[in-house]
Amino acid sequence: MTAFQGRRIVLGVTGGIAAYKAIEVCRRLVDGGAHVSPILTDGALHFVGETTFSALASEPVQTSLWDEESPIPHTRLGQGADLIVVAPATARSIAAYAHGLSDDLLTATLIATRAPVIVCPAMHTEMWEHPAVQANLEILRARGVIIVPPAEGRLAGGDIGTGRLAEPSDIVAAVEQALLASADLSGLRVLVTAGGTREAIDSVRVITNRSSGKQGYAVAEEAASRGATVTLVTTVDRPAPAGATVIKVSSAAEMQAAVMPIAADHDIVVMAAAVADFRPVTVAGRKLKKDEFGEGGTPQIILEPTHDFLVDLGLAKPAGQVLVGFAAETDDVVENARAKLERKRLDLIVANDVGAASCGFEYDTNAVVLLGADGMHQDVPLTDKRIVARAILDAVMALRAGPD
Ligand code: CTP
């Protein structure tokens, strides 16, 4: 697995002759397995075409704050990014970023992100050496922005000097290094459960719930992209993150049988699955026929409770393991979730109001409250499930680090 696999990279391209080299950077990142979202400034569009980037990148080019249906594309791109690289970066874009001027989609995204940022300047030697440009770069460096300095060589118009955009291979190497450095889950084993369980009535019918597994998969993807070794116990067929060990199960009992023997081998356990609380007492080994129940008759399905194995995981939790449960609620969300956190001896619970608009089951978005055994309470307002996954794993890592 490469450092790029599954990582979300925003590639910012500003207006300079070297913009054509960003096409090669884009191609190499996508080839490495990254999900690349290109943002082109108006200036960049004078040098390169949208079509080339849209064809090579993982999603179409965005050029403006007002292209998308969403009125806030910069927060989506900024919060969702694992890394932002600006290549080439003009003197103007460097100045705007250094001074927090968010007057276009790229600078707004740069200011809306907490991900590592790499800036690759390209300009004429006189501009590069100008104290204003150097002072702006110093401001960015002091904030942790990585600067890939320009090289010496032939510049636009035939001049020779320093200011030529670094080679795509050097830019890609800087991205790789920054991604490796941000792989904060590297060396950790993460077990995630996902999806709703299916409890058989007969050989063809099941009782299940609306869980799509999307939130669990988002946690698995986020963990893998941050360097973790991931085991995914799932009831659904979705593309799993590269390198993950996938164990496919169906019922609550099967999920329990898969999880219990391996849970102790994991540093982090995230029980995102919607495990059935009840299952039919008897399961017919064949299809039940209507005429078995007489004219207009219906079967009586008697249910029994399933075993809550998250309770077992809480009791058997090895020292140092962080155990995360989910609480799917429709009423008194926070109170019910805190009670579950305590009763099941969890370190963290993700309280999910599955009755709220655009939240929970089947949606790509979610809004949750994270509650920690240490008293932590964090609202994660409606956003992509991947960003919710990031907040969950950030909270897990804060718990592992202990109090400041
Ligand atoms: N869970 C489990 N085994 C079960 C039921 C639930 O391990 N048989 C886990 C789920 O994976 C989830 C957490 O327990 O992480 C909470 O599940 P939820 O159904 O919200 O809570 P319950 O404890 O079942 O409480 P209730 O149904 O009364 O809300």
Image (tube, rainbow, N blue to C red):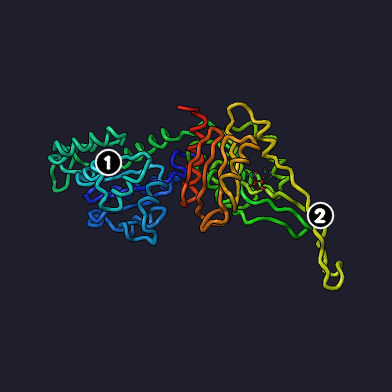
- Residue at the spot x=38%, y=35% of the render? 178
Q: Please, what secondary structure does the residue beneath circle 2 have?
A: loop
- Residue at the spot x=36%, y=58% of the render? 71
- Identify the mark at residue 283; answer none if there is no mark: 2
Whether residue 254 is visible here, answered yes or no, is yes
Q: Residues within 10 Å of mark 2 (few under 14, many from 20)?
A: some
Splitting the image into 4 quarters, where does residue 133 fall?
top left
- Residue at the spot x=53%, y=56% of the render? 356
Q: Which residue is at the front of the view, 208 or 1?
A: 208
Task: Tell me residue 271's x, y (percent).
Answer: 61, 42
Q: Quadrant of ligand 1?
A: top right
Task: Tell me residue 96's x, y (percent).
Answer: 23, 45
Q: Mark 1 or mark 2, which has the lower sequence index?
A: 1
Q: Determine whether label 1 and label 2 are within 8 Å by CB.
A: no
- Residue at the spot x=75%, y=51% of the render? 279
Seen as rendered, the residue at the extreme bottom is: 295
Q: Please, what secondary structure does the residue beneath circle 1 have?
A: strand
Q: Which residue is at the front of the view, 371 or 253?
A: 371
Q: CA distance from mark 1 to mark 2?
A: 64 Å
Q: Which residue is mark 1?
A: 120
